[in-house]
Image: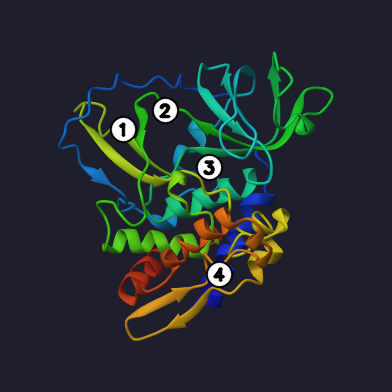
Amino acid sequence: MSRNTKTAAVFIAIVSIALPFAANPKKRSGTRNQRNETPQNAPKVLWRKPADISARDLFYGPGGKEDQPGITYTFLKEDLKGSHPKFDVRDQNGVKWRAKLGAEARPETVASRLVWAVGYYTNEDYFLPVLRVRNMPRLQRGQNLVSPDGSITNLRLKRYLKDEKKIALWRWHRNPFVGTRELNGLRVMMALINNWDLKDDNNSVYEEQAGASSGSAELRYMVSDLGASFGTTGRSWTPTRSRGDLNSYRHSKFITKITDDYVDFRTPSRPALLFIFNPVALIMHLRLLWIGRRIPRSDVKWVGQLRAQLSPD
């Protein structure tokens, strides 16, 4: 199970990363319905059964081809939060996007496709090989990634949805889905893509309109930062191996133990030994190890059957 499943994921990752992205003008304005106040009894959703997994478009993802970014962009503001350079832009259709630069752009886009394909919520992410922005100022972070002509290569764009609002973070060990196969299946997916950076800060709860006509809202739980994927199984002292390194991913161990009742996965694993000199980071990552351990076999089988419906096509 481990070798075949991971080989398929490697193939999909390689294809998704290698294929060029051709940005076409958007036909939709991106305008969403006005959002209402969230009722106290708003339904909480982590996973929704896909209509046809085998037909899901892993190239364009949840936004589809029709929601892909435009051609021209205007700079809005730089975001100094987090550990990777980011800034906001608006395309010619009035749609707002958040650009993320650096080593996480490719793996995050691919990871979002696989997680979404089996029914979990993800952001509408797109990978662009090159981006040119009007009125581009000098960035406080990531200026070394900007070419002299103002162009930026290899970045991720995340679409802002006007009927969607981030309202909270959620915790792996304390949330409405603890003990369910849906949450356990998400834990398996994190192990499959080698997403070792599972701190709660990377989890988001979004309030989103459930239907255009009903006006009702639901709370969608998602892992909103999947950038530390497709590399080593834990935080490496060599940053280039920790994410987006298919050689490290391909040679990493997937399953460490199988019993009659549970399965233990390698991801997330202990960080590199040198992190003893950074005890805060060391302790934080050690507290995450349980996420990949003692997952019921029945839940592993359930999400495995969903993944089995994917193909290179």
Q: Which residue is mark 2?
A: 161
4 vs 3, front mark? 4
Q: Which quarter of the figure has residue 232?
A: bottom right
Tell me which numbered mark, 4 or 3, is placed earlier along the sequence.
Answer: 4
Q: Which residue is painted at 32% across and 41% down in the image?
A: 220
| Image-based side of 36 in relation to 159, left or right | left
Q: Which residue is mark 4?
A: 6
Tell me which numbered mark, 1 or 4, is placed earlier along the sequence.
Answer: 4
Q: Nearer the viewer, residue 230 or 67?
A: 230
Kindly check if marks 1 and 2 are in contact, taking CB atoms under 8 A apart as contact: yes
Residue 192 to residue 96: above or below:
below
In this picture the colour scheme is rainbow
Kindly check if marks 4 and 3 are in contact, taking CB atoms under 8 A apart as contact: no
Q: Which quarter of the figure has residue 306?
A: bottom left
The span from disc 1 to disc 2 (Cα, nearest Å) is 9 Å
Q: Quadrant of the C terminus?
A: bottom right
| Residue 65 drawn at (x, y percent) | 51, 36
Q: Few, some or many C-alpha atoms within 10 Å of disc 2 (few <14, some 14-19, many ≥20)?
A: some
Q: Secondary structure at mark 3?
A: loop
Q: Secondary structure at mark 1?
A: strand
The circle on residue 208 is 1
The span from disc 4 to disc 2 (Cα, nearest Å) is 32 Å
Q: Few, some or many C-alpha atoms within 10 Å of disc 3 (few <14, some 14-19, many ≥20)?
A: many
Q: Nearer the viewer, residue 158 or 71?
A: 158
| Residue 81 drawn at (x, y percent) | 56, 32
| Image-based side of 271 in relation to 290, left or right | right
Q: Which residue is mark 3?
A: 60
Tell me which numbered mark, 4 or 2, is placed earlier along the sequence.
Answer: 4
Q: Which residue is painted at 39% across and 46% down in the image?
A: 222
